[in-house]
Amino acid sequence: MADTLKERPVYRNIHVSQIVAYRLPPAGIVSILHRVSGAAMFLLLPFVIWLFDNSLTSEISFDRFASVFSAGVGFLPGWFIKLVCLGLIWAYLHHFIAGVRHLWMDMTHSVSKEQGHSSAVITLAASLLLTVALGAKLFGLF
C-alpha cells in the first residue's frame, strides 16, 4: 500500500524554475510584501520629503505641488506621479497593517496556522481595499 502513494515534492532550496510551481501560503505572501513595502518606502523617501517640503514651504510652492499631479514634473506626466503616490499609499498601508498584525500576534500569542492564515488574508484584503479607496480619491473618482 505504501508503494501506491504518490510522493510529495520536497522543496529545500527553491530554484528559479520552481518558483512558478511553488505556492506560498498567505502568511508568506504578507511577509514578503511587508519587506517589499518597507524597501519601497525607504527608497522613495526623498520623493516623499520633496512632496512634503513643496506642500508646506509657501503658497507658491503648494500651488506647484498641486500642479504636479495634473501637469507632471519634468518629463514625468501627472498620471505617473499619481501612480507612484498610489504605490506609496499601498506600501504604507500594507506595512502598517502587517506591522499591527505582527504586534497583535506577539501580544496574544496567536501562532497557530489557522490564525496566521486568517490574519494574513485580512491583512491583504484590508490593505488592498483601503488602497483602492484612497486611489479612487487620488485619481478624482469621488
Image: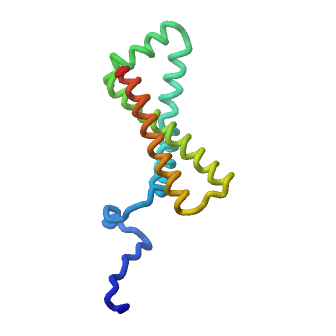
Corner quadrant of residue 85: top left
The answer to whether residue 73 is visible is no
Q: Please, is residue 15 above or below residue 62 in the view?
A: below
Q: Which residue lies furthest to the top in this view?
A: 59
Residue at the image position 46 percent from the left and 49 percent from the top: 33
Q: Please, is residue 3 above or below residue 54 in the view?
A: below
Front-most of residues 62 and 123: 123
Q: Position of residue 86 (x, y in %)?
A: 41, 31
Residue at the image position 31 percent from the left and 23 percent from the top: 77
Front-most of residues 73 and 98: 98
Q: Which residue lies furthest to the right in this view?
A: 107
Q: Where is residue 113 in the image (x, y as percent from the top left)?
A: 53, 63
Q: Where is residue 105 in the image (x, y as percent from the top left)?
A: 62, 53
Front-most of residues 44 and 127: 127
Q: Please, is residue 2 above or below residue 139 in the view?
A: below
Q: Please, is residue 55 above or below residue 132 in the view?
A: above
80 with respect to 121 (left or right): left
7 with respect to 49 (left or right): left
Q: Where is residue 135 in the image (x, y as percent from the top left)?
A: 40, 29
Quarter occupied by the C terminus: top left
Residue at the image position 47 percent from the left and 29 percent from the top: 47
Residue at the image position 51 percent from the left and 30 percent from the top: 46
The answer to whether residue 30 is visible is yes
